[in-house]
Image (tube, grey):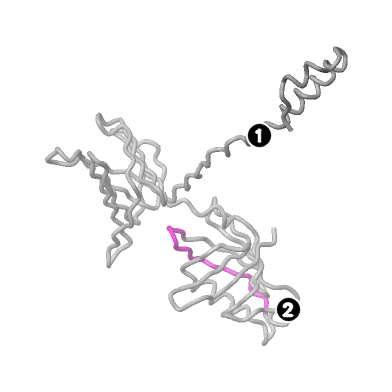
Amino acid sequence: MCFARHAIDKIPLMKKIIFLTAWLFAVTACKTVQAPPPPETIQEERMPYFKGNGNEPFWNISISEDAIRFESLLSGFESVTAPSVAPVKAMDANVKMYRAHTENIDIQIQIEQAECVNSMSGAASPYAVTIEIKRKTDKDATILKGCGAYLTDYRLYDIWALEQLNGQKVTLADFGKELPIIEINSQTNTFIGFAGCNQMNGRLFYEKNTLRFTNVTTTRMACGPKNKEGEFLKALQSATGYEIKNNRLWLSNPSGLLLVFKKID
């Protein structure tokens, strides 16, 4: 409640001081306290799923869901950022073409699955990259060649236990003592695990939205007639796509869902 000032003048001095102190406190409390503005929401930039680079002159490129970023020592093309676009895929080879544009610059990126060796370091990469870049006012494009690789989804790096096989929930009765477990190392593109009867290991083939389990080898222990290890291994090697949600890894191919694993690490 707010008080008129003349009411204070009728109060004795000591009481006036006490009253005035209380009044100032009450006035301060009466003021509306404004909450600080919410912190600015910062949208986390999505990590790139492909990176490439080349020499003479030096350049590098990264592709994410959000943007295509190109940097180089070329005059006028030191730093170029274009909105990400869907690639055009070749019908008869693993070749993808990205055609991106900014207000002033056109850039075309070709990514071909082919062993590529860096001309300076000698390091080998699984993809050859060709860049064609030009200003909209240029007649001809500058052509650059180099190497690159897809960056395997870091979320795969974990230990996963089988929950479903070909649409059916699995139990110990399907495999004996233990359910299949797979441990994925997304940094080395390798995996190890237990297939339900034998130990197994192999390699990953990864591209954006594509995951395959390749070069699978197992020990040779004899399995019981009801053990579903063979069915599991067939499904694992048939997978081409994946999804990670609710602490689970879902493996599928164009025919449908194959396997569901639960994160256990």
Residue 204, image x, y percentages: 51, 60
Query: Could you say which is closer to the camera, residue 197 or residue 14?
Result: 14
Q: Residue furthest left?
A: 139
Residue behind mark 2: 172
| First in sequence: mark 2 vs mark 1 | 1
Label 1 secondary element: loop
Question: Magenta stretch containing residue 98, yes or no?
Answer: no
Residue 93 in view here: yes
For label 1, count other residues whose C-alpha is less than 10 Å away and answer few (under 14), some (14-19) or many (20+).
few
Answer left or right for 44 relative to 34. Answer: left
Q: Please indicate whether residue 133 sits to the left or right of residue 199 in the image.
A: left
With 204 as the anchor, is 175 left or right in this view? Answer: right
Q: Is residue 26 left or right of residue 185?
A: right
Nearer to the camera, 35 or 107: 35
The residue furthest bottom is 225
Query: What range of the chain is rendered magenta?
Result: 206-222
Q: CB of mark 2 within 8 Å of CB of mark 1? A: no
Q: Is residue 95 above or below residue 216?
A: above
How far from the left and from the top, in percent, is residue 113?
35, 56
Q: Amino acid at mark 2?
A: Leu
Q: Which residue is mark 1?
A: 32
The residue sitting at 47% across, 67% down in the picture is: 241
